[in-house]
Amino acid sequence: MDFHTRLKELREELNITQATLGKDLGVTQSRVADWETKRGRPDIEMLKQLSDYFMVSIDFLVGREYTVCENCKKRI
């Protein structure tokens, strides 16, 4: 799952509008809409805010799987 889809699902789980999320985060509703429709991406600071807001990790928010990559195993 990609960030855009996950963001929309998390927002809908809380039953809040794009406008409400935007207000809570200090951005416009159109900014949230851009994130959900792949017209834009939040910066790293906003990703931190979003992960705190939804109480999820940034990895989860951006759709990463919880597996160890092959290259990571080689470094250990």
Image (spheres, rainbow, N blue to C red):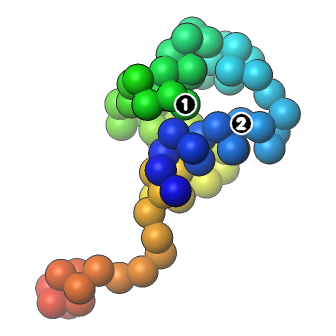
* Residue, far right: 15
**Looking at the image, is mark 1 or mark 2 nearer the viewer?**
1
Left or right: residue 8 compared with residue 57: right
The percent coordinates of residue 27 (x first, y second) are: 54, 13
Residue 8 visible: yes
The percent coordinates of residue 69 (x first, y second) are: 29, 80
Nearest the eye: 2 or 62 = 2
Q: Residue type at mark 1: give it.
A: Glu
| Residue identified by numbered label 2 | 11
Residue at 57% x, 44% y: name it.
Answer: 5
Give the mark nearest the N terminus, 1 or 2.
2
Dot 1: what SS?
A: helix
Q: Tell me, yes or no, whether the two marked residues, 1 and 2, touch with CB atoms within 8 Å.
A: yes
Left or right: residue 8 compared with residue 60: right
Q: CA distance from mark 1 to mark 2?
A: 10 Å
Dot 2: what SS?
A: helix
